[in-house]
Image (cartoon, grey):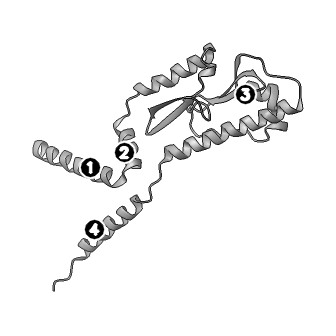
Amino acid sequence: MKCPSKSALLVLLLVFAFLTSSLSAADPSFEITKRCKNNLKMLREALLVYLKSTTNEPPRGDIIDFNQAYTMLLTSKFLPQKPDKPTTDCDYFLAYKDRDRFEWFCRIHGVISGDQRITFPYHEFEFTAAFNSNFMTNAKYKRHYDEVMRWTAYNRTLTESIKYHYTRNPTTTAIMVFFGALLVLYIYRNIFG
């Protein structure tokens, strides 16, 4: 019986390592969304503590950005640690009607749980944002909704598309990229070689 060559064993080992590592790939979109929703929960809890400890309230019917709300209401007493934004576009805002009706929302992820959902591509990720229709009468909240809707028309670059598909199905994506590279190499060698 003929023994396989070292290079053949190395190729088999690399293929096995690739296949086993791709089985454990995690979806980073889920983790980013989870971190953002945890930030929104932290902000909600801090505002609830603030509202229980004082009779003062934020301006009613307005959208307040995080920095303004932090300076005006929360401070380090109610929010010892500012939220760490998982994406560069994650900015937090407070939509306040009264003590019982308010929502913190993210520019990209929307509210924690709302009655409307929109799934859209965000670079190499895909997010589902939630919206609360009770605040749609507010012009600033409606503008936020429209900004998120613009992401639904976003077209990923080739690199972003490969990264997106790799997180969904690493093995198939790697095989497609490999065969695509072979095709480009074949065409290049036939034209310039």
**Mark 3 Cα shell of 10 Å, populated few (<14), some (14-19), many (≥20):** some
**Mark 1 Cα shell of 10 Å, populated few (<14), some (14-19), many (≥20):** few
Disc 1 element: helix
* Tag 1 near tag 2, CB within 8 Å: yes
Q: CA distance from mark 3 to mark 2?
A: 36 Å
In the picture as drawn, the residue positioned furthest to the right comes out as: 54
Looking at the image, residue 186 lies above or below residue 63: below
The residue that disc 4 covers is 11
Q: Residue at x 78, y 38 (%)?
A: 79
| Occupied quadrant, residue 141 | top right
For marks 1 and 2, the one nearer the N-term is: 2
Q: For the residues carrying marks 4 and 3, which lies nearer the camera in this image?
A: 3
Q: For the residues carrying marks 4 and 2, which lies nearer the camera in this image?
A: 2
Q: Residue at x 61, y 43 (%)?
A: 35
Amino acid under disc 1 = Met
For marks 3 and 1, the one nearer the N-term is: 3
Looking at the image, residue 151 lies above or below residue 22: above
Q: CA distance from mark 1 to mark 4?
A: 18 Å
Q: Residue at x 32, y 70 (%)?
A: 13
